[in-house]
Amino acid sequence: MDLNDIKKIKKEALSKIAGLEDLNAIEEFRIAYLSKKGEVSKLMEQMRQIPKEDKAAFGKEVNELKNALTRALDEKRNELEKKALDAALESEKIDITLDAYTPTLGTLHPLTLVRRAIEDCFVGLGYKIAEGPEVELDYYNFERANIPEGHPARDMQDSLYIDEKTLLRTHTTAIQMRVLEKESHNLPIKLICPGKVYRRDNDDATHSHQFMQAEGLVVAEGITLADLKGTLQFMTDSLFGEGHAIRFRPSYFPFTEPSVEVDMSCHVCHGKGCPTCKGTGWIEILGSGMVHPNVLKMAGIDPEKYTGFAFGIGLERVAMLKYGIEDIRDLYSNDIRFLKAFKRLD
Ligand code: DAH
């Protein structure tokens, strides 16, 4: 073994390094040449056999070999690592010019929009929101609403009974009766009660066996019909926009006295007369009145001291008027084309 042999080994090794193709090969090379049992160490071991005068030159040459291989291997490793990183970056590249996947978002159902609009309007006036059971006792649906058994007013609403004492509530007035009882010692009361109600009706363009109402109730000292009118005007302003007159027509409900039906000037023709208002210029929107003294008494509230007003508004009717929906069944068939088209109207 002489210096030329070492130079030869160096040349061969460097050309091997130049040909290494991946990081595994680099490691294999390092073990083969530069580890404790590698070629370079083996050369060092041969020092013993080298004549004394040549030892220094031999040692220097081996050292140079070691340094040269280490440097070349480091360079190669850096080069391969950079290549691997570039390849990863390339393969994981996101093509930002591709069309994004846009999820189809649902829309709020028109009845939800109307319910929220009514709630927002009254919550802004300091009302609380109350709920009650849809499977209701006859007692709250009728008795406490001043409609005792055998009262002809029971026929005004065809009911779906579950057993003799239980039915699907026919109106949100049942919630009103529960609240009056519960809050009788907690006056004044200012409430809005939205919910589903049920009637034994055959479904057609204007009837649905299930529909929604929102009940309003205020009980305090000194409440008058004028408060009712101002409140309802505020509600129609916020639901249909300002500028619609409202009028009271005398009516009858067992739970209110006096009772009124409320009309709003037609929002389509502004009172001139059109098919929507059947030429009258007015559209009936809800029933209301002053809470009947019997109702207050049954709830344990003194009608001499306290008075109140109540109203019940149909949400389908508001939705149909507001959005020009002609068939109430569209609100319940969940036809996606209808719901999508509606989105534009919101
Ligand atoms: N409960 C009535 C109905 O379903 C609507 C109604 C009328 C509610 C007058 C009221 C009211 O609170 O005062 O037809």
Image (spheres, grey):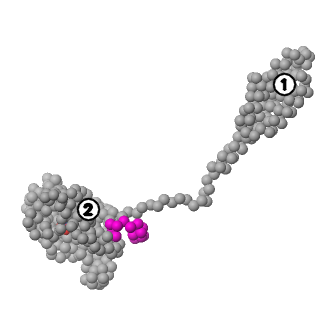
Spatial CA distance of label 1 from label 2 is 94 Å
Q: Residue at x 72, y 32 (%)?
A: 27
Specify the amino acid type for callout 1.
Val
The image shows residue 24 at horizontal and vertical percentages of: 71, 35
- Residue 335 belongs to magenta span: yes
Of the pair 247 and 215, the residue shown nearer to us: 215
| Mark 1, residue position | 62
Q: Residue at x 28, y 67 (%)?
A: 315
Give the dominant element type of the magenta stretch: helix, strand or loop. helix
The answer, for residue 45, to whether it is visible in the render is yes
* Magenta span: 330-345
The image shows residue 155 at horizontal and vertical percentages of: 14, 69
Q: Residue at x 61, y 53 (%)?
A: 94
Q: For this view, does 167 lie left or right of residue 34?
A: left
| Mark 2, residue position | 196
The answer, for residue 187, to whether it is visible in the render is no
The answer to which image quadrant residue 110 occupies is bottom left
Q: For this view, does 181 lie left or right of residue 323?
A: left
The image shows residue 180, relative to residue 265, as above or below, that is above
**Badge nearest the viewer, 1 or 2:** 2
The image shows residue 109 at horizontal and vertical percentages of: 36, 64
Graded by Cα atoms within 10 Å as few (under 14), some (14 to 19) or many (20 or more), the crowding at tag 2 reads some
Of the pair 303 and 109, the residue shown nearer to us: 109
Secondary structure beneath disc 1? helix
The image shows residue 33, relative to residue 180, as above or below, that is above
The image shows residue 247, relative to residue 35, as above or below, that is below
Specify the amino acid type for callout 2.
Lys
- Residue 7 belongs to magenta span: no
